[in-house]
Amino acid sequence: MKKIILAAGVLLAAAFGLQAAEVRLNPDHPDEYVVQRGDTLWDISGTFLAQPWYWPEIWQVNPQIENPHLIYPGDRLRLVYVEGQPRLQLERGPRPYRLSPGADRLQPQVRREAVSEAIPAIPLDAINAFLSRTRIVEPNAFEGTPYVISGQDQRILMGAGERIYARGDFRAPLASYGIYRPGEVYADPYTGEILGLQALDVGDVDLYQLDPDQRQDFAVATMEVTRTSREIRLEDRLLPVEQRSIAALFQPGAPATPVEGVILGVEEGVTQIGKYDVVAINQGEREGLQPGHVLAIYKRGAVVRDRIENENVKLPDERAGLLMVFRTFEKMSLGLVLESDRALEIMDLVRNP
């Protein structure tokens, strides 16, 4: 029996309404797989499956195991056949042992893994790095929010450790705020509908004091800058602090409904999109997308001239990669590119895999 020791883990989620389909195993699949720290569910899916988005079709939940959808380092996955169909069974790894107070020997402990210790669906470093720098908000999110009017000594560029002054509605003041700058406006390239707004992270501030002599619905507040990712400028906006990291506890799967969309944008500074880049697409919750859904990326076929027939001909669209959706909004989503065999770009197509 082939055995492979690899990193892995499984996560909370439901099968995303996938239609019954023939599951094709990876020709080099192992019969057993021991999970190690650092792997992802996408890695494990690709180890067993030729098409990793069919994971829900082979994952067999054991109701006798606590948190059966979560996979931890040290767990063992076994490939079995149930009524002729391939299934993966989970066997929890050995319980940890520790020395109890006052004891002279190791005592077995009940295994109580934290959800955060389970392996994620996809690499979290790239996702959380993006989310720490960028936030997607509604198009009108900045309307009526406090804004920076000055720095100390009337400076127009400010940084960490300084005090700044913001003006706005502070009738219900918060202890801390995030500072953001409006970025790219995401619009549907076909309909012109505004789908969302990119809010660029600038830094964080703590409220120091409010001017008691001014109306609190349009007051001047003194703020202490606690963190900056770029220089603070006049007119930068204050928004409530948001928890932007993500646990990625979902399963890869294919959308249950047809998806036809495009890549709208990528993180600033990126010119050619590749593996582990975060992209924005013009499909969201209203189109049925959920975190974990896998989409194929296609290069749009060029239009060339047929000189014999004297007419323009569109070449076929060519599949060029895969992405997994990890955060959805009503009208758009964010996805992580997991595979690409050539440079991708804005306006490339996204479809069902």
Image: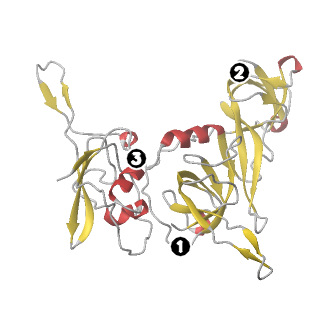
CB under 8 Å between discs 3 and 1: no
Which secondary structure lies at badge 3? loop
- In three-dimensional space, the C-alpha distance between marks 2 and 1, rounded to whole angstroms, equals 47 Å
Dot 3 surroundings within 10 Å: few (below 14), some, or many (20 or more)? many
Which secondary structure lies at badge 2? loop
Q: Nearer the viewer, residue 276 or 88?
A: 276
The answer to which quarter of the image holds residue 351 is bottom right
Residue 213 location in percent, x, y? 85, 26
Disc 2: which residue: 160
Dot 2 surroundings within 10 Å: few (below 14), some, or many (20 or more)? some
Q: Earlier in the sequence, mark 2 or mark 1?
A: 2
Residue 30 in sight from this viewpoint: yes
Residue 321 location in percent, x, y? 55, 58
Tag 1: amino acid: Thr
Residue that appears at 73% across and 76% down: 313
Residue 40, which numbered label?
3
CB under 8 Å between discs 3 and 2: no
Which secondary structure lies at badge 1? loop
Residue 106 lies left or right of residue 65; in this view the side is left
Residue 263 lies left or right of residue 2; in this view the side is right
CB under 8 Å between discs 2 and 1: no
Tag 2: amino acid: Ala
